[in-house]
Amino acid sequence: MNDKPADTIEIIVNGEAQLFEASLSVAALLAKLGLPAKKIAVEHNLEIVPKSAYGAHMVDAGDRIEIVHFIGGG
């Protein structure tokens, strides 16, 4: 028996399954996760997503997203 609501999709984010209301763009995913688009790299199903495509690049059920934060230092 599946215990997730029928109107949600499951996306794997950094190795953890997470539920979202529907397919969404990378930009919308980052916003829902509370992450700024700056200083972040996003890999979608093993391919890097260019920052310029975050608004149009869609994520759907079963997709795998890896998000890497860049931290400056010196």
Image (tube, rainbow, N blue to C red):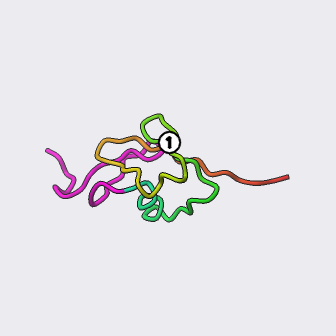
Point out residue 15 in the picture as x, y percentages from the top left corner: 45, 41
Q: Residue at x 24, y 56 (%)?
A: 8
Q: Which residues are magenta?
A: 1-24
Residue shown at 50% from the left, 65% from the top: 34
Q: Secondary structure at mark 1?
A: strand
Identify the residue shown where x is 36% and y is 50%.
58
- The residue carrying pointer 1 sits among few (fewer than 14), some (14 to 19) or many (20 or more) residues within 10 Å by Cα, namely some
Q: Is residue 13 magenta?
A: yes
Q: Which residue is mark 1?
A: 43
Where's residue 6, x and y in %?
16, 55
Q: Amino acid at mark 1?
A: Glu
Q: Nearer the viewer, residue 2 or 49?
A: 49
Position of residue 11 measured from the top left corner of the image (x, y, whole percent) = 35, 47
Q: Residue furthest top?
A: 46
Q: Tell me if residue 19 is in the magenta stretch.
A: yes
Q: Nearer the viewer, residue 6 or 44?
A: 44
